Image: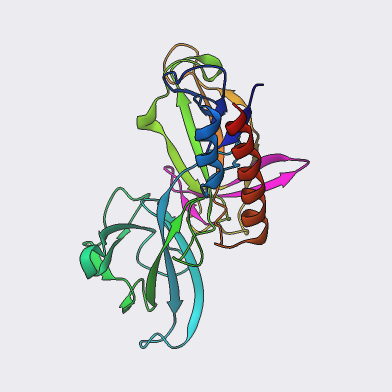
Amino acid sequence: FWLKLKCHNFEYMANQPMPSSHVSSVGIHITMKPRLLLFCLLSASCGRSLASSEVEAWDVAATIYSDSFCMERYTDLLLMQDTCYSSGTYSNSSVAFKVHIVGYGYKGQDWIVDFQEFSDNCITPLSSTSSLVVGDCVGLMGRFRSTLSVKFRSDKCNEEEQSCSNMAAGQQLFYAEADCQGEEMTELTRYVPLQGECLMMRDGGSQSFVMSTSDNKTTIARTDYPGNTACSTLVETVEYTIREQCYSLFSSQTPMSFKWVVHQAASTVNGSPWTRTSRAVLAAVFLISSARW
């Protein structure tokens, strides 16, 4: 009687003692016996697909206002930390900006977000860093003010207990060898948001990324705006379709290949009828199985 189940990106089997874990392109594989399977079934993370990679991060939600008292709502932004965003829509003086959380509300203290504007692709600062308190009405860019909040991006995020981020993120992975083999060059790993946000490029242009899913296949549409820092549709654009495959890069130097992975957090709600019922039924089945084992 052999058991096999996907749980929290692990694959469990009941025919061997626990070996060392190893990482593959579809997840991390270890083994476990039926009684430990019960623990998996009762956990909130049970049942995830091996193909869906997990990335946990804090995102910054910014509500933008056009007045000085944060009364007249202009738009909402969901920002990925340390990503170089175009500021063309909001400022006439800067080209780009980025945010980074530096205070995490430890023991009742304020959450703090560092904000900085740049004159290029986030290399040359245009101003000193502003440390903004989450929840306050603060100056942001140009004439705009904002209130900030933080959102947790994770499959483990519970909407009844915390504010969850629904940001889809693309991760570009580089490899030392061809065909996405060999050592993963983690120092080159890049993350981008996939909701069409306008991001800065190195050559003074801008670009956006949008995720789409069709026939159970996920693709990323990348649009470049050469020579334009605000993703303006008035300029000639260059479009690419990024698929779930390995791409060749250099033939005689590293990195030789790269690929993209899409991460889309699916937050949960405690007490979901499906989650609660299915978990209880599966737990009962394995209780019986383990008793007979």
- One can see residue 106 in this view: yes
Magenta residues span: 197-223
Where residue 87 sits: x, y (%)? 42, 63
SS assignment for the magenta stretch, majority = strand
Where residue 220 sits: x, y (%)? 63, 43
Outermost residue on the top side: it is: 252
Outermost residue on the right side: it is: 215
* Quadrant the C terminus occupies: top right
Q: Residue 175 colored magenta?
A: no
Where residue 249 sits: x, y (%)? 52, 22
- One can see residue 236 in this view: no
Where residue 218 sits: x, y (%)? 67, 41
Outermost residue on the front side: it is: 292
Q: On the picture, is 89 further left or further right than 138?
A: right
Camera-side residue: 42 or 208? Answer: 42
Q: Residue 222 colored magenta?
A: yes
Camera-side residue: 264 or 90? Answer: 264
Answer with the quarter of the image where residue 150 lies. bottom left
Answer with the quarter of the image where residue 71 lies. bottom left
> In the image, what residue occupies the spot 38% across and 76% down?
147
> In the image, what residue occupies the spot 58% across and 63% down?
271
Q: On the picture, is 134 further left or further right than 166?
A: left
Camera-side residue: 92 or 62? Answer: 62
Residue 134's place in the image compared with 2, above or below, is below
Display colour scheme:
rainbow
> In the image, what residue occupies the spot 31% across and 77% down?
138
